[in-house]
Image: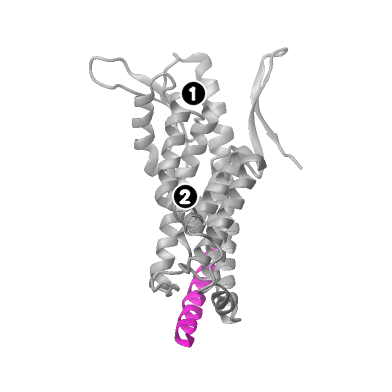
């Protein structure tokens, strides 16, 4: 037990040091990201509106970017016999690329998935809040294990399970990432076919958050290689718990407390089930919850149109014919 505790402490200390180093780098990248958001969310729509006043409906426009031009409106022909189909690029689009052609929209989303996933990944791991969350997850794991809380919880649960076999099965099954990914896919298909833009966009947010969380969790498991109560050498952090909290956080951000709070309660139940079934220690579950919330919150916010912390909304005044963008903030 002492050797196991020592290995956990050393492994978590490495994670904490790595996150602290990344946090200092994130501070330098913050200003650049703000400027990039301004170019994409304010200058880009203004440029598109200006071109549409003088040019034919289908044009290829772009604005300068430090990395590469950001296309505003693109065209793509399915084959030589069909005319080109215009679509708005993912940086500026809300809803399917081709609202009346679901399968074409699926193809476009698959082509754009690497770009959107990379954008979410960069945003997540240059976000100081996420890095602080990873630091907190590592620190919590160290503190809980080093102070003997894991051992105390283990003594109270080992051989004294509180949940029935059925309840353990519910938590183990519905808390699994293997269920969460099909759930996101089902949400995507439903939103696309029913033309529910909010559900469609939420499913894409959830899918990216689950992918990033899954890769992060597995990386930490292999980096720390801490033993779980059931003998698994990849114990910390709990993947079931982190994934469940990703689902709860994304749905809370999209639909508010009426949907989010029950899902948070279920995510907590999943964490408790992991401990009760002796699949994980208490520290594994606490760290998994922190990681899942931090990553999902970052991805969800990156999928919202924001500038300097304010919501970016279209603005139109029918009386004067003025169109533009409005910045709003809710307290």
- For mark 1, give the secondary structure: loop
Mark in front: 1 vs 2 = 2
**Above or below, 300 relative to 222:** above
Residue at 36% x, 19% y is 85
Picture layout, residue 174 above or below residue 49: below
The residue range painted magenta reads: 1-24
Q: What numbered label is drawn on residue 229?
A: none
Q: Where does residue 35 sit, x and y in percent of width and height?
A: 57, 45
**Residue nearest the observer in this picture, 306 or 200:** 200
> Would you name the residue on which mark 2 appears?
174
At 66% across and 43% down in the image, what residue appears?
Answer: 257
In this picture, residue 50 sits left or right of residue 97: right
**In percent of the image, x 37 and y 30: which residue is there?**
106
Q: Is residue 143 left or right of residue 14?
A: right
- Where is mark 1, residue-wise? 195
In this orientation, which residue lies closer to the viewer: 326 or 228?
A: 228
Closer to the camera in the image, 149 or 215: 149
User: Which type of secondary structure does the marked residue at label 2 adopt?
Assistant: helix
Q: Residues within 10 Å of mark 1 (few under 14, many from 20)?
A: some
């Amino acid at each position: 037990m002492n050797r196991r505790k020592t290995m956990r402490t050393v492994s978590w200390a490495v994670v904490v040091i790595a996150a602290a180093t990344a946090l200092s780098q994130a501070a330098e990248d913050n200003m650049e990201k703000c400027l990039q958001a301004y170019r994409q969310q304010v200058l880009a729509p203004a440029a598109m509106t200006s071109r549409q006043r003088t040019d034919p409906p289908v044009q290829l426009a772009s604005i300068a970017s430090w990395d590469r031009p950001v296309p505003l409106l693109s065209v793509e022909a399915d084959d030589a016999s069909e005319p080109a189909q215009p679509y708005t690029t993912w940086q500026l689009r809300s809803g399917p690329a081709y609202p009346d052609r679901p399968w074409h929209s699926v193809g476009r989303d698959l082509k754009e998935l690497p770009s959107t996933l990379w954008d979410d990944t960069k945003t997540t791991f240059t976000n100081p809040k996420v890095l602080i969350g990873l630091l907190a997850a590592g620190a919590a794991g160290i503190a809980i294990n080093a102070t003997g809380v894991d051992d105390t919880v283990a003594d109270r649960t080992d051989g004294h399970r509180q949940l029935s076999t059925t309840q353990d099965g519910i938590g183990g099954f519905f808390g699994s990432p293997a269920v969460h990914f099909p759930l996101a896919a089902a949400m995507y298909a439903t939103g696309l076919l029913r033309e529910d833009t909010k559900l469609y966009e939420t499913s894409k947010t959830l899918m990216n958050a689950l992918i990033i969380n899954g890769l992060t969790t597995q990386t930490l498991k292999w980096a720390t290689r801490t033993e779980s109560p059931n003998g698994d050498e990849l114990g910390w952090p709990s993947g079931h718990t982190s994934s469940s909290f990703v689902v709860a956080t994304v749905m809370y951000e999209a639909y508010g407390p009426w949907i989010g709070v029950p899902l948070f309660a279920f995510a907590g139940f999943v964490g408790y089930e992991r401990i009760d079934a002796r699949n994980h220690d208490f520290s594994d579950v606490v760290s998994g919850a922190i990681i899942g919330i931090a990553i999902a919150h970052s991805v969800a916010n990156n999928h919202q149109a924001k500038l300097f912390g304010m919501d970016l909304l279209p603005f139109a005044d029918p009386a004067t014919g003025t169109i533009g963008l409005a910045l709003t903030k809710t307290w």
